[in-house]
Amino acid sequence: EVHLVESGGGLVKPGGSLRLSCAASGFTFSSYNMNWVRRAPGKGLEWVSSISSSSTYIYYADSMKGRFTISRDNAKNSLYLQMNSLRAEDTAVYYCGRDRLFGSSWFDAFDIWGQGTMVTVSS
Amino acid sequence: SYDLTQPLSVSVALGQAARITCGGDHIGSKDVHWYQQKPGQAPMLVIYRDTNRPSGIPERFSGSNSRNTATLTISGAQAGDEADYYCQVWVGSTWVFGGGTTLTVL
Protein backbone atom coordinates (compact mmCIF):
# COMPACT_ATOMS: atom_id res chain seq x y z
CA GLU A 1 0.00 0.00 0.00
CA VAL A 2 1.20 3.49 -0.82
CA HIS A 3 2.05 5.56 2.24
CA LEU A 4 3.58 8.89 3.18
CA VAL A 5 4.38 9.56 6.83
CA GLU A 6 5.58 12.93 8.04
CA SER A 7 7.57 13.49 11.21
CA GLY A 8 9.70 16.11 12.90
CA GLY A 9 7.08 18.65 13.87
CA GLY A 10 6.89 20.23 17.28
CA LEU A 11 7.13 23.43 19.29
CA VAL A 12 9.94 25.82 18.39
CA LYS A 13 10.73 29.40 19.37
CA PRO A 14 10.66 32.25 16.85
CA GLY A 15 13.93 32.33 14.97
CA GLY A 16 14.49 28.64 15.55
CA SER A 17 14.88 25.75 13.14
CA LEU A 18 13.17 22.47 12.48
CA ARG A 19 13.66 19.65 9.99
CA LEU A 20 10.63 17.76 8.74
CA SER A 21 10.84 14.33 7.18
CA CYS A 22 8.45 12.41 4.97
CA ALA A 23 8.94 8.66 4.69
CA ALA A 24 7.56 7.03 1.57
CA SER A 25 6.61 3.40 1.08
CA GLY A 26 4.71 1.24 -1.38
CA PHE A 27 5.90 2.96 -4.55
CA THR A 28 9.07 3.80 -6.48
CA PHE A 29 9.87 7.02 -4.64
CA SER A 30 12.76 7.95 -6.93
CA SER A 31 10.41 8.25 -9.92
CA TYR A 32 8.04 10.84 -8.51
CA ASN A 33 8.20 14.57 -7.97
CA MET A 34 7.35 15.50 -4.38
CA ASN A 35 5.84 18.46 -2.59
CA TRP A 36 5.25 20.17 0.75
CA VAL A 37 1.99 21.96 1.52
CA ARG A 38 0.85 23.53 4.79
CA ARG A 39 -2.37 24.58 6.41
CA ALA A 40 -2.28 27.18 9.16
CA PRO A 41 -5.04 27.19 11.82
CA GLY A 42 -8.17 28.79 10.43
CA LYS A 43 -6.66 29.22 6.98
CA GLY A 44 -6.53 27.34 3.69
CA LEU A 45 -3.95 25.19 1.97
CA GLU A 46 -0.69 26.91 1.08
CA TRP A 47 1.93 25.43 -1.21
CA VAL A 48 5.43 25.45 0.31
CA SER A 49 7.88 23.77 -2.05
CA SER A 50 8.32 21.15 -4.78
CA ILE A 51 11.24 19.00 -5.90
CA SER A 52 11.62 16.89 -9.01
CA SER A 53 12.41 13.18 -8.85
CA SER A 54 16.16 13.62 -9.28
CA SER A 55 16.31 16.97 -7.42
CA THR A 56 17.09 18.79 -10.67
CA TYR A 57 14.20 21.21 -10.28
CA ILE A 58 13.34 22.86 -6.97
CA TYR A 59 10.71 25.53 -6.40
CA TYR A 60 9.57 27.54 -3.39
CA ALA A 61 6.74 29.84 -2.50
CA ASP A 62 8.03 33.39 -2.21
CA SER A 63 7.46 33.63 1.55
CA MET A 64 9.66 30.54 2.10
CA LYS A 65 12.56 31.41 -0.18
CA GLY A 66 15.82 31.78 1.70
CA ARG A 67 14.40 30.24 4.88
CA PHE A 68 13.21 26.78 3.82
CA THR A 69 15.17 24.10 1.95
CA ILE A 70 13.60 21.07 0.35
CA SER A 71 15.67 17.96 -0.32
CA ARG A 72 15.27 14.24 -0.85
CA ASP A 73 17.25 11.06 -0.41
CA ASN A 74 16.01 8.54 -2.97
CA ALA A 75 18.11 5.78 -1.41
CA LYS A 76 16.20 6.27 1.85
CA ASN A 77 12.81 6.93 0.21
CA SER A 78 12.63 10.17 2.14
CA LEU A 79 11.70 13.80 1.56
CA TYR A 80 12.86 16.60 3.83
CA LEU A 81 12.08 20.22 4.65
CA GLN A 82 14.66 22.22 6.56
CA MET A 83 12.99 25.26 8.07
CA ASN A 84 15.10 28.10 9.46
CA SER A 85 14.29 31.54 10.88
CA LEU A 86 10.84 30.34 11.82
CA ARG A 87 8.10 32.85 12.48
CA ALA A 88 4.77 32.65 14.27
CA GLU A 89 3.03 32.68 10.89
CA ASP A 90 4.79 29.43 9.97
CA THR A 91 2.63 27.65 12.54
CA ALA A 92 0.71 25.04 10.56
CA VAL A 93 0.19 21.41 9.77
CA TYR A 94 2.74 20.45 7.13
CA TYR A 95 1.85 17.79 4.58
CA CYS A 96 3.98 16.02 2.04
CA GLY A 97 2.31 15.09 -1.22
CA ARG A 98 3.25 12.92 -4.17
CA ASP A 99 2.97 14.14 -7.73
CA ARG A 100 0.50 12.05 -9.70
CA LEU A 101 2.74 11.28 -12.67
CA PHE A 102 5.38 8.54 -12.75
CA GLY A 103 8.69 9.58 -14.24
CA SER A 104 7.46 12.97 -15.41
CA SER A 105 9.60 16.01 -15.98
CA TRP A 106 6.71 18.38 -15.26
CA PHE A 107 4.56 18.81 -12.19
CA ASP A 108 1.00 17.57 -11.86
CA ALA A 109 -1.68 17.07 -9.21
CA PHE A 110 -0.88 15.56 -5.80
CA ASP A 111 -2.50 12.15 -5.61
CA ILE A 112 -1.08 10.82 -2.33
CA TRP A 113 -0.79 12.80 0.89
CA GLY A 114 0.58 12.11 4.32
CA GLN A 115 -1.42 12.79 7.48
CA GLY A 116 0.68 15.83 8.32
CA THR A 117 2.91 17.00 11.13
CA MET A 118 2.15 20.01 13.32
CA VAL A 119 4.67 22.82 13.63
CA THR A 120 4.06 25.43 16.31
CA VAL A 121 6.25 28.53 16.45
CA SER A 122 5.78 30.30 19.75
CA SER A 123 7.82 31.75 22.59
CA SER B 1 1.29 36.78 -8.64
CA TYR B 2 -1.63 34.71 -9.85
CA ASP B 3 -4.81 34.65 -7.76
CA LEU B 4 -7.54 32.03 -7.61
CA THR B 5 -10.88 33.18 -6.21
CA GLN B 6 -13.31 30.78 -4.55
CA PRO B 7 -16.50 31.54 -2.61
CA LEU B 8 -15.98 31.15 1.13
CA SER B 9 -18.98 28.88 1.47
CA VAL B 10 -21.56 26.99 -0.56
CA SER B 11 -24.69 25.35 0.80
CA VAL B 12 -26.69 22.65 -0.94
CA ALA B 13 -29.74 20.59 -0.07
CA LEU B 14 -29.16 16.88 0.36
CA GLY B 15 -29.34 15.18 -3.02
CA GLN B 16 -29.07 18.38 -5.03
CA ALA B 17 -26.15 19.57 -7.16
CA ALA B 18 -23.44 21.70 -5.61
CA ARG B 19 -21.25 23.90 -7.76
CA ILE B 20 -18.00 25.38 -6.48
CA THR B 21 -16.28 27.94 -8.68
CA CYS B 22 -12.65 28.91 -9.01
CA GLY B 23 -11.95 32.17 -10.80
CA GLY B 24 -8.65 33.15 -12.34
CA ASP B 25 -7.31 35.15 -15.24
CA HIS B 26 -7.50 32.90 -18.33
CA ILE B 27 -7.78 29.86 -16.07
CA GLY B 28 -9.33 28.01 -19.01
CA SER B 29 -5.85 27.73 -20.50
CA LYS B 30 -4.47 26.00 -17.41
CA ASP B 31 -4.88 22.56 -15.85
CA VAL B 32 -7.02 22.83 -12.72
CA HIS B 33 -6.96 20.28 -9.93
CA TRP B 34 -9.46 20.00 -7.07
CA TYR B 35 -8.97 18.70 -3.53
CA GLN B 36 -11.36 17.81 -0.74
CA GLN B 37 -10.29 18.16 2.88
CA LYS B 38 -12.37 17.05 5.84
CA PRO B 39 -11.58 18.16 9.42
CA GLY B 40 -8.58 16.37 10.86
CA GLN B 41 -7.79 14.63 7.58
CA ALA B 42 -5.28 15.06 4.80
CA PRO B 43 -6.44 16.61 1.53
CA MET B 44 -7.67 14.21 -1.15
CA LEU B 45 -7.52 14.70 -4.90
CA VAL B 46 -11.03 14.56 -6.41
CA ILE B 47 -10.49 16.02 -9.90
CA TYR B 48 -7.27 16.44 -11.89
CA ARG B 49 -6.65 18.28 -15.14
CA ASP B 50 -10.04 19.96 -15.19
CA THR B 51 -12.30 16.96 -15.71
CA ASN B 52 -10.61 13.70 -14.66
CA ARG B 53 -11.56 11.65 -11.62
CA PRO B 54 -8.92 9.56 -9.82
CA SER B 55 -9.86 5.95 -9.21
CA GLY B 56 -12.16 5.58 -6.23
CA ILE B 57 -13.75 9.03 -6.58
CA PRO B 58 -17.53 8.76 -7.10
CA GLU B 59 -18.98 9.70 -10.48
CA ARG B 60 -21.03 12.44 -8.85
CA PHE B 61 -17.81 14.54 -8.78
CA SER B 62 -17.13 16.31 -12.07
CA GLY B 63 -15.21 19.33 -13.28
CA SER B 64 -15.19 21.87 -16.05
CA ASN B 65 -12.95 24.74 -17.02
CA SER B 66 -13.52 27.57 -19.45
CA ARG B 67 -12.28 31.10 -19.97
CA ASN B 68 -11.95 32.62 -16.49
CA THR B 69 -13.80 30.07 -14.34
CA ALA B 70 -13.27 26.45 -13.37
CA THR B 71 -16.12 24.62 -11.67
CA LEU B 72 -16.33 21.56 -9.45
CA THR B 73 -19.80 20.01 -9.52
CA ILE B 74 -21.05 17.48 -7.02
CA SER B 75 -24.24 15.93 -8.36
CA GLY B 76 -26.51 14.54 -5.72
CA ALA B 77 -24.55 15.86 -2.77
CA GLN B 78 -24.31 13.56 0.24
CA ALA B 79 -23.78 14.38 3.90
CA GLY B 80 -20.32 12.85 3.60
CA ASP B 81 -19.37 15.46 0.98
CA GLU B 82 -19.30 18.20 3.61
CA ALA B 83 -15.72 19.44 3.52
CA ASP B 84 -13.41 22.20 2.38
CA TYR B 85 -12.64 22.20 -1.33
CA TYR B 86 -9.61 23.78 -2.99
CA CYS B 87 -8.70 24.43 -6.60
CA GLN B 88 -5.05 24.41 -7.68
CA VAL B 89 -3.06 25.44 -10.74
CA TRP B 90 0.59 25.47 -11.77
CA VAL B 91 1.70 28.87 -13.01
CA GLY B 92 5.09 30.50 -13.31
CA SER B 93 6.87 27.53 -11.72
CA THR B 94 4.74 27.77 -8.62
CA TRP B 95 1.66 26.05 -7.33
CA VAL B 96 -1.28 28.26 -6.46
CA PHE B 97 -4.24 27.17 -4.32
CA GLY B 98 -7.55 28.91 -4.18
CA GLY B 99 -8.64 30.18 -0.79
CA GLY B 100 -10.96 27.24 -0.27
CA THR B 101 -14.73 26.75 -0.13
CA THR B 102 -16.60 25.16 2.74
CA LEU B 103 -19.44 22.99 1.46
CA THR B 104 -22.43 22.52 3.74
CA VAL B 105 -25.04 19.88 2.93
CA LEU B 106 -28.41 20.83 4.42
Image: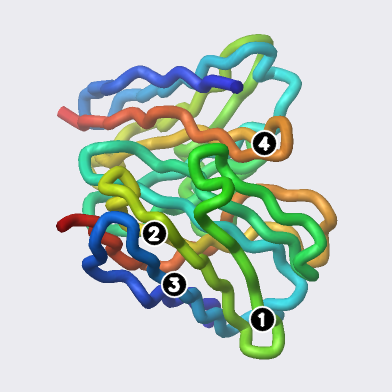
Name which of mark 2 and mark 1 comes first in the sequence: 1
Label 1, residues with CA under 10 Å away: few <14, some 14-19, many ≥20: some
Q: Which residue is mark 4?
A: B90
SS for callout 1: strand
Whether labels 2 and 1 share one chain? yes
Q: Residues within 10 Å of mark 4 (few under 14, many from 20)?
A: some
The type of residue carrying mark 4 is: Trp
Q: Is residue B72 left or right of residue B69?
A: left
In the rendered image, which quarter is residue A46 located in? top left
Chain of the residue under label 3: A
Q: Which mark, residue A73?
A: 1
**Viewer-side label of 1, 4:** 1
Cα–Cα span, label 1 and label 3: 14 Å
Q: CA distance from mark 4 to mark 3?
A: 26 Å
Colour mode of the rendering: rainbow
> Quarter of the image containing the C terminus of chain B?
top left
Element type at mark 2: strand
Q: Is residue A45 above or below residue B55?
A: above
- Residue at point 39% right, 66% down? A17
In the rendered structure, which disc, 3 or 2, sits on the residue that comes first in sequence? 3
| Residue at x-position 65% and y-position 19% | B27
Chain identity of mark 2: A
The kind of secondary structure element at disc 3 is strand
Q: Work out whether disc 3 and disc 2 sit on a shared chain.
A: yes
